[in-house]
Image (spheres, rainbow, N blue to C red):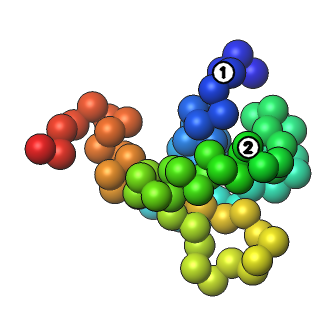
């Protein structure tokens, strides 16, 4: 994959894998391989930052070891170029 920035890869993965209803996406080993990601400390830190910025949210019913996230409305507006202000 030609995308180098970890943050962009994560957002792109969630956006491309989800359906039109934007359900939670479980980031499996096979998806990590396709998007050239590994769940190391840097990736976890990036995900934490995305959650703090309200760009993604973690599935509250997911287990501790399950990596399940979805895009928020804020991120969808940003990705579509629509200003929230």
Front disc: 2 or 1? 2
- Near mark 1 (Cα within 10 A), the count class, few <14, some 14-19 or many ≥20, is few
Quadrant assignment, res 10: top right
Relative to 75, is 41 on the left or the right?
right
- Return the x and y of residue 52 as percentages of the image width and height: 46, 58
Q: Quadrant of residue 12?
A: top right
SS at badge 2: helix
Would you place residue 13 above or below residue 69 in this image? above
Please tell me which residue lies in front, 82 or 42: 42
Name the quadrant of the C terminus: top left
Q: Which residue is mark 1?
A: 3
Quarter assignment of residue 15: top right
Quadrant for the N terminus in the image: top right
Observer able to see residue 65: yes
Q: Residue at x 76, y 77 (%)?
A: 64
State the image coordinates of residue 54 (x, y, percent, origin top left).
Answer: 41, 57
Q: Nearer the viewer, residue 30 or 41?
A: 41
Question: Residue 36 versus residue 16: which sits nearer the camera?
Answer: 36
Locate residue 28, reporting x and y percent. Answer: 81, 55
Separation of disc 2 and disc 1 at Cα?
16 Å
Say above or below: 71 vs 82.
Answer: below
């Amino acid at each position: 994959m030609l995308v180098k920035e970890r943050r962009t890869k994560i957002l792109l993965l969630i956006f491309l894998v989800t359906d039109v209803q934007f359900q939670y996406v479980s980031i499996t080993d096979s998806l990590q391989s396709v998007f050239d990601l590994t769940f190391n400390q840097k990736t976890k830190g990036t995900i934490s930052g995305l959650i703090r910025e309200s760009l993604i949210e973690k599935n509250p019913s997911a287990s501790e070891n399950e990596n399940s996230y979805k895009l928020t409305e804020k991120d969808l507006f940003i990705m579509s170029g629509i200003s929230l202000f």
